[in-house]
Image (cartoon, rainbow, N blue to C red):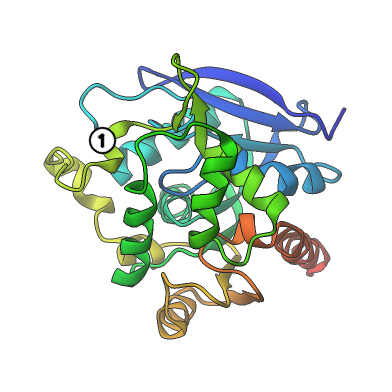
Amino acid sequence: MANRAQAETIEVNGLSLNYQEWGDSRSTHALLLLHGFGETSGIWEEIAIELSREYRVLALDQRGHGGSERPRDHNYSRNSQVEDLESFVEALGLRNVTIAGQAMGGANALCYAAEHPDVVTALIVIEAAPEVLRSGVETMRRLLASADSFDSLDDAVEIYEEFYPYATSEQLNRRVKATLARSEDLTYVWDFDPIFRDPTARPPDPDPGQRRMTNLWECVERVQCPVMIVRGAETDMLTPEAIQRLHRRIPGSRVSLIEEAGHAVPTDQPQALSQHIREFLQSLSRSPA
């Protein structure tokens, strides 16, 4: 049963959050997978199935994404998302976690690890850094502005082909299914809060106690666990120099380059990413205490 996902929901911080689970649910350690902005837990399916052979794997729909509830105040601050992680880990009774985060999920993972060094055993930070390129952000905005809805999944795949040139047809189909949902009129719509597509929307101002996570570099400098930083070789979101700065600020971290992958590494090269994650975690288990 390890390769079959169990869909679950849990109440966290007043919101109902959706997550998927693979592997041995009795384990008090889990590999937690966090998607990027405008994505869902579905982007991790192949990777989760592969890694659930060795680990309990959890993939969370972060607030406002996928099957998780959308906050009425549209609070999607990093602080609120990290608080969700804190409550999620506690509610499931996990003693410690390894976290793999893509883009936004990677930034959230860095800050959670900074706040909870006693809980996080290792981090895999995928296409996330305090410095990103405008070109990558604009590419994401163009995709989200490409259509309000799609008449069919095939129509969506046709548009996605421009934005994911390194993904196979099979991967594109998986990506579309992981980011769209069937609406009442039987069209396919974006599976996240519509406010994410509004370029004029601004998050609510945080209160003074929530400002500690606005500067991602401050979180980076407090991370204590082993870290692998993953970059897609063809990404338009991060420069090699930004990755090297991140690498230097986290002593002992390592950098892994995934060939023939853009920003969406879990979509473009799921098998290669799974292999890199497995080898990284195995290397830690072999390290002397």
Residue 147 sits in which quadrant?
top left
Would residue 273 be seen by someone viewing this image from the given angle? yes
Residue kind at label 1, given as amino acid type = Ile
Neighbour class for label 1 at 10 Å: few (<14), some, many (≥20)?
A: few
Viewer-side residue, 192 vs 211: 192
Vertical comparison of 225 with 16: above or below: below
Q: Which residue is drawn at 54% across and 23% down?
A: 91
User: Percent x, y for residue 62?
Assistant: 45, 35
Query: Which quadrant: the C terminus?
Result: bottom right
Q: Residue at x 52, y 77 (%)?
A: 251
User: Percent x, y for residue 206?
Assistant: 15, 41
Would residue 119 be seen by someone viewing this image from the given angle? no
Tell me: 130 left or right of 29: left
Q: Residue at x 41, y 47 (%)?
A: 37
User: Percent x, y for residue 119?
Assistant: 56, 45
Vertical comparison of 235 with 46: above or below: below
Viewer-side residue, 223 vs 149: 149
Query: Which quadrant: the N terminus?
Result: top right
Disc tally is 1
- Residue farthest to the top? 184
User: Percent x, y for residue 145?
Assistant: 32, 48
Vertical comparison of 272 with 93: above or below: below
Residue at the spot of label 1: 195
| Callout 1: SS | helix
Viewer-side residue, 129 vs 191: 191
Q: Residue at x 52, y 18 (%)?
A: 10
